[in-house]
Amino acid sequence: MAPGCDQPGEFRAPPEAGTPPEGPPRYRWFCLEHVREFNARYNFFAGMSPDEISAAQRPYAGWERETRAFAHVGADRPPSWGDFSDPLDAIAGRFRERRAASAGRQDGKPLSEADRRALHVLGLGIDADRRALRQRYAELARRYHPDRNGGDRSHEARLQAVIAAYQQLKSAPAFA
């Protein structure tokens, strides 16, 4: 708060210069009128040399630091600190689900991402065979077809998704 001001300090301002760097910064809080005054006279570059100012104004300032890679092949790797206590299986369960979702078929036939989505639409596992595919397609087509629902067209989008999924999988190498 500004000295002599009785308004609540709702707006945060940077800490005063010379504040010790230990712990979290101790921000100053001002009312709207006093934060406007503070912003009008605030100079981020005060006390910097011309070289420091130039370095701070570079378009890529801060981007030259080393960072970890974001992409992995397949699922995220489980934590390297795997001997932690996880009684509810909350953390390990996440990695188990991702690894299972990216797992291959038992017979070694390849599945594309579109094939996996189509299997999900049909409610089939990744190891389904051509016979199971045809049976599931026939079952879902009968369930969602308007002739079987008394002319109800509310399931039309679902039927189209089932047909598209079957067409995708019918020509997939895993079901050839």
Image: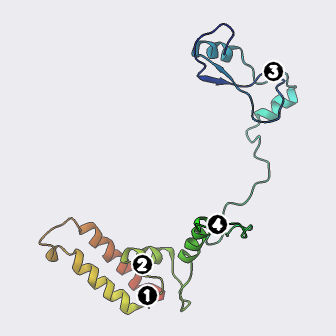
Q: Earlier in the sequence, mark 3 or mark 1?
A: 3
Q: How far apart are marks 2 and 1 (CA)?
A: 9 Å
Q: What residue type is labelled 2?
A: Leu
Q: Which of marks 3 and 2 is nearer the N terminus?
A: 3
Q: What residue type is labelled 4?
A: Asp
Instruction: Identify the element where label 1 is drawn.
Output: loop
Answer with left or right where residue 132 lies relative to residue 107. Answer: left
Q: Distance between the residues labelled 3 and 1?
A: 68 Å
The answer to whether the residues at label 1 and label 4 have Cβ atoms under 8 Å apart is no
Which residue position is annotated with label 4? 86
- Name the front one of labels 4 and 2: 4
Which residue position is annotated with label 2? 119
Which residue position is annotated with label 3? 46
Counting from the top left corner in percent of width and height, residue 136 is at 32, 84
Q: Distance between the residues labelled 4 and 2?
A: 32 Å
The answer to whether the residues at label 3 and label 2 have Cβ atoms under 8 Å apart is no
User: Toward which corner of the image does residue 15 lie, by quadrant?
Assistant: top right
Which residue position is annotated with label 1? 128
The answer to whether the residues at label 2 and label 1 have Cβ atoms under 8 Å apart is yes
